[in-house]
Image (cartoon, rainbow, N blue to C red):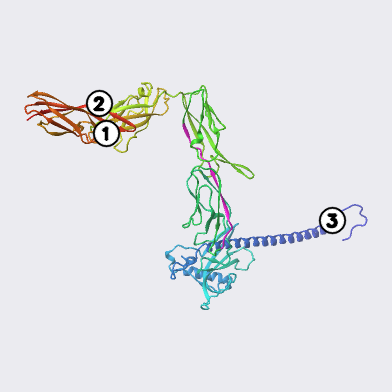
Amino acid sequence: MRRDPGATTDEGFSLIEVIVALFIVGMVASAVLVFFMRGSSTASHLQRTQSSASIATQAMEKVRSVHPRPGSPTDPSPLVIGRTEAEVSAAFAKVAALDPTLVAETNKLWDPAAAAKPVTLKVSNDVTVSGMKYQVTTLIGSCYRAKSASASDTTCVRTNPGASAALVYRAIVVVTWNPGVEKCGGDGCFYPMTTLIDPNTDATWNISTAPVANDDEISFSAGGAARDVDILANDVIVSNRSNPTTITSAPAQGTATVITSGTLMGAVRYTPPADYSGIVTFKYKLRDAQGRNSGEATVTVLIYPVAVDDSGARVPAGASANLAVLANDRGSSLRPEILTQSPHGSATVNADGTIRFTAAASAPLGNTTFTYRVVTPVPLDDGVKELWSDNETNVTGRTGTVTVRIGTAVAAGDADFTVDASSSSTPPWTTLDVQTAAGGSAANKVVVVSGPTRVDATGNGTPSFTGSGSTTLRFRPVTDVAGIYTFTFELEDASGDRSETRTGTIRVLPVANDFTYGTEVRGAKTVTVSPRTGNAPKVAASRITYAVASQPSCTRTAGSGNVSATVALAHATDGNFSFRTVSIPSSWRGSCSFTYTVTYTGGGLTWTSNPATVFLSNVRGS
């Protein structure tokens, strides 16, 4: 195109020049777009191939997790349990269409009784990754491998060559996907993986790695329950029929034992110590079916302290008291830390680990609380690690709640009581004046905290209380039982304030009663008199003994002369007395009497009754 030579100004591009320029720019943009799309397609294909390799590896690991050896020579391998002949044949045909060499030297295996069993390994399943669906086909077949072959030799043929070969299983995993573009041919893309499995040994895999044991950290609380810990979760080891774990160094605190069977085989059951907190370790190693050992791994156990609630402390308004809150806590080298203060006082930690509580001068009568936690400091090479009872782990830890009673304690001391034993089938109630005996006020209520408990012997039933929480406490002994009992109680005033817990002692003592023997005693003879039957207890007891207090004296009502009589006790515990008229005139008529005592020994006490009288009302000479 010619320009006007006379033009003196820039007249711009002509239409033809603009069209040519746009055409050139379009050509360049198209080339760049094609290059970008081809690059993106290549990158996507590479990513999908990598995903298929990962999926195939996961599927093969599932195969490796199944022990291949049949339970008996007639059983199918556990690898093919639940697989039908039809689905196995279809899967083999599908893989043969992709690459005939993958299955050319493999015999198909299936479960003849598949319909009655759950499937161990699915023949086919789908996996979706990043929006792409992959189909996983897992084939299990058999082939024959030379017995002399090395571990790396994977040559295995379909036809049995004879005694020099051994039957092994071949696992074939094929992952297929359709990228939607012509990347792998018309049938889509696929990724294969194969391995041989020897059923004649304990799961020998020609592509498995040696076991690797990795360190673990676990948490417990002092005095907590034993727990099973799956230390294998982060380790590397091929599935095994036998326990792979051996503890090589035991923990210094607590116990660690290996679980040798069941679904948790190879895990460790750790039992924490009852009253220790800190950090302990133990070590273990792994051994796989090929006899390969891992290195040692260390299990670090964090044992947290436990704060236990406290109660029973009493502080008057405006006063202070030191509280030994650590006495019932569990752990080592404990230090308390206050978490929440009482609304009616303040708590501070003393250097000796006690907590000083100061009740406000205006604090109302009643209970108030504050909370604390306990801390165990553990020195480490790089500093100090603190283990708190209110830890953030999932172990049982807690804060301790301290309940303080604000107010002056009701005055009360220990109290002693004496109650008569009873032979009645329904012994009477005896009122115990606890208030007077304990030095309290008659208006105080008596609250039984525990008991009654026999302290001088065991058995023989339990006596009863009635009226606890009222101003009148009554006691009923057990029929025909003497003994010593204790109970604990508190006195409570009208405002609800109570005394310290005190001890009451009840002595249920035997009763010796007068007794009349009305049977005729004629002439010089000996008779057995048993006053015990009218006593309480009326039965013989090892802690109760009888004794003669005075010899007989006789009174004549007719006849003449005097009587000579004696009384003796053959056995101290049976209460049977032998009364004997040594000499008596034939005309003598009258009565005789003697006295006896009962003694109780037990609980550091020896008690003897007042003398009771035995009256023989019909004594005569002939």
Q: Quadrant of residue 534?
A: top left
Q: Quadrant of residue 335?
A: top right
- Mark 3 or 1, nearer chain start: 3
Return the x and y of residue 280 as percentages of the image width and height: 55, 47
* Marks 3 & 1, CB-CB < 8 Å contact: no
Pick the front one: 3 or 31: 31
Residue at the spot 60% in from the left edge and 64% down from the top edge: 178
Marks 3 and 1, how far apart at CA: 140 Å
Q: Number of numbered discs present? A: 3
Q: Which residue is mark 2?
A: 610
Q: Which residue is mark 3?
A: 13
Pick the front one: 605 or 315: 605
Return the x and y of residue 33 as percentages of the image width and height: 72, 59
Return the x and y of residue 300 as percentages of the image width and height: 56, 49
- Look at label 2 and name its amino acid: Asn
What's the magenta region? 292-311
Q: Which residue is mark 1?
A: 544
- Look at label 1 and name its amino acid: Ile
Q: Magenta span has 501?
A: no
Residue 536 can be seen in this image: no
Horizontal side, residue 555 vs residue 98: left or right: left
